[in-house]
Image (cartoon, helix red, strand yellow):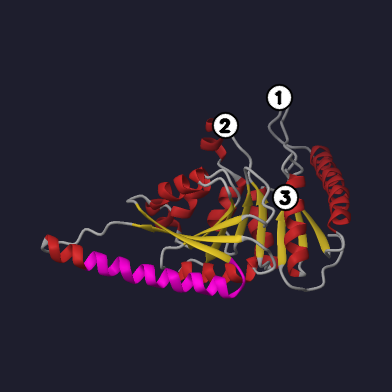
Amino acid sequence: MEGTCRRAGLKILVPVDFSDITNVVLRVVKRIAEAHGGEVVLFHAVSPAVYIPYPESLTVDVIDVRILQEIEESKKKEAEEKLKGFTDFLKPVPSMVIVDIGDPRDLILEAEEKESPDLLVIGSHKKGLVEKILIGSTAEKVVKHSKKPVLVIKGSEPTFSKKVLIAYDFSKTAEKTVDFALKFLKPFKLKVEILHIDEPIDIPVVEKIGEALYEKYRSEKRNYVEKLKERFSSEGFEVSTSFVSARNPSEAIVTFVKENPDIELLMMGSRGLSGLKRILLGSTSTEVFRKVDIPILIYKEEAE
């Protein structure tokens, strides 16, 4: 562990893997931290050294274990030196470095538990289909299991100067996402669009009565979204709203993003589900995360 962090505005945990997306992630993190008077925790996981026994032996000798430990420590020191260079880039933002050995997907979540950041920022890489099936994605596992808001950098670099799309579904998590967005976006001069996917409701009553109830429900939702618009307007944002009728919210959100190239960041909420529910039901935010080609910030609410 290197450096020190003084507790300031926004504490950001940044998993770094030294890939080609690292520089983009660091620029985004610095932009956010400077705007919020925040601090940064840079984290890197060193993959464990793998022992391959000789054909005639299936045991690991003491000397072999020592060699493996030396290899891991060498990699750890090398990573720490690289991260020190990143702390120089981040200045004057205060930052610290943590390097650990093990599976990055597990260690990132452990670091989150220990450091208790306000936000995680992680890069996402494009993988081949077979690789996705076999090992999944580090970013996807973090998005699924994190208890904190996660900003995933993918597709392009957000400058926080264009338009941010907020997907809103009237849930308690969506309300908290709006509260978070108002604070998070406050330092930036940008446009905000609030999107609601209006799912048809099948009401088992007389057709005309059902239509009347549905229209009244839609009207009430539109009125509430207008109030949300006023909240953002009062904070100095240029705001617009969109209602899209669709039976599949995740597909509708992805399509909307593709059809509006001026959107540089998508924000949406994700209510934490227990392991079994996550397997059975999946998640709109997870589906959207997989399919959009722009940065996405997922506000997390801890599982009930």
Separation of marks 1 and 3 at Cα, in angstroms: 47 Å
Place residue 57 in its image quadrant.
Answer: top right
The three-letter amino acid code for the residue at tag 3 is Val
Kindly tell me whether residue 46 is visible in this rendering: no
What number of labels is visible? Answer: 3
Kindly tell me whether residue 281 is visible in this rendering: yes
> Could you say which is closer to the camera, residue 184 or residue 228?
228
Instruction: Determine contact: label 3, label 2, CB under 8 Å.
Output: no
Q: Residue 56 carries which label?
A: 1
Question: What residue is disc 3 on?
Answer: 25
Residue 4 colored magenta?
Answer: no
Q: Main secondary structure of the magenta part?
A: helix
- The residue range painted magenta reads 213-237
Instruction: Determine contact: label 2, label 1, CB under 8 Å.
Output: no
Q: Taking 269 as reference, is 49 above or below it?
A: above
x and y percent of residue 114 in the render?
A: 69, 66
